[in-house]
Image (cartoon, rainbow, N blue to C red):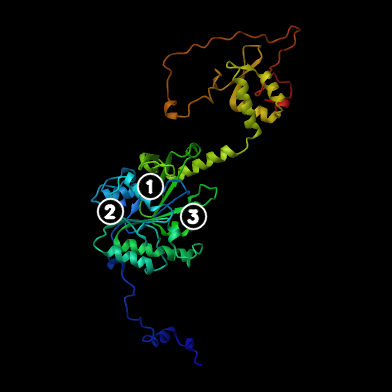
Amino acid sequence: MTDDYAQPPEDYWAGRADADAPPAGNLKPRKLSEIKAPPPTQWLAKGWIPYSEITVLVGEEGLGKSLAWVRWAAAVTAGRADQSISLPARKPRDVVVIVTEDNPGEVKARLALAGADLDHVYLFSSEADGTGNPVFGNAMNGDMATLDAYLSQQEIDAALIVVDAWVDTVAGSLTLKDSQQARQAMHPWKMLAQRHRLAVILMTHTNRMSTANTRDLMGSTAVLRQKARMVLFAARSPEDKESGGDYVWIGPDKSNVTGISDAVKYRLKIANVRPATDDDPGTTACLDTYTRAHTVIRNLLAEWKEQEDQATRPKSKQEQAQDAIREFMANHPNGCPTEDLKQHLEELEFGKTASENARKALGVSSPAGYGQPYVYRLNSQSSYSDPISQEPKNSRNTRNTEPSRAVRVPSLPTLPSFLSNGDELGTISPCHACGDPLDDGEHGHHQECAA
């Protein structure tokens, strides 16, 4: 056998020039300067829903997030602006809807309540009553090819497709836990969006993890976040959860093409849409008025998670002691002897460290007068002013500021420097914690007050 590599490299490759010639076809290296780049991202709703891309709307089950796409779809079909997501007024366009969780009749009632033009809404299903969900695989075939063909007809001028919920339409042969198969399941939607220059919203649920990390909250598969151009999160604050849920917060969490917009707080509205019966209350819901949060949704999720953690975390001994102090001081609006408070906390079996730290956190001890016992006051009760700790933090309001008038400081009486027996009077300092005089050898605290 000939050792080809015994030849010089240039002779080796020269002998294979014809055999290794690139095959004929469209695949070849191209100069970037000659590439006809696609146009920049176009938006159905700027900063929220792009054309020719996939948008994922994720939220807890039963949250009311489906009412969001109903509101937006209604605006598209009516040619109406929706300022909550920067959706401008345009000519009315069609919306194709695939629903798997909600009754088609309920979807129709919600769209009508939201002001949709139902002639511009197409429910993609196999049965005349709107039931019979399509199943989509990993290629432009089967039900996806059928949908593609209908969108190619002149009768349908679709600007938006909504799949609620996307997981229910994925072929059983695909395992979404496998990231490669999950990507394959999403790829046809990307192709469909680009081919017809429309927006696609895929609805999905969050998982049940106790976290504020939006990456970890993504249900179904992490590929949803990776493959989607936009990710919108829907959530409720802890207060809304306790009250039964009057509001839904929605905001972009990820964007590959623009800055992240602030979240929007929608108010839920329940309205009568048909006569009530014993079996049917005759009501449905929509998203009514809205306000802006002035922060992104991920910040709100982190804040709410911290509130929930604080509410469920057991209180420390110091925090319990602080609660006891507040309750005790409610009956002493002008302050109380420090010793009385110390004794009260001791009777409640709080340790010295917890007791001292709680007192220091909430108030201050100061003598009622020269030679008088120390009195404890809460910070809100105390007239004590520390020129250092009470200094305002805003340096613009405090630096280089001259007093408006001179302040006269009264002179203090001269104290005797010798005891009656002729011994020199020593300097006696008070304890920082309780105010009692310190003995020799003690520095700043009594031994029983030492932390």
Q: Earlier in the sequence, mark 1 or mark 2?
A: 1
Q: Nearer the viewer, mark 1 or mark 2?
A: 2
Check residue 219 in the rendering and tell me which mark sits there, or answer none: 3
Which residue is at a point 42% across and 29% down the rendered structure image? 396
Q: Nearer the viewer, residue 32 or 330?
A: 330
In this view of the protein, can residue 259 be seen by the observer?
A: no
| Residue type at the position of mark 2 | His
Residue most toward the right?
421
Q: Which mark is residue 68?
A: 1
Q: Are marks 3 and 1 in contact (CB under 8 Å)?
A: no
- Callout 1 crowding tier (Cα within 10 Å): few <14, some 14–19, many ≥20: some
Decide: is 230 above or below 346. Answer: below
Distance from the alpha carbon under mark 3 to that under mark 2: 31 Å
- Mark 3 → mark 1, Cα distance in angstroms: 19 Å
- Nearer to me, 68 or 87: 68
Name above or below for residue 327 compared with residue 233. above
Which residue is the site of mark 2? 120
Give, as a three-letter code, the residue at label 1: Ala
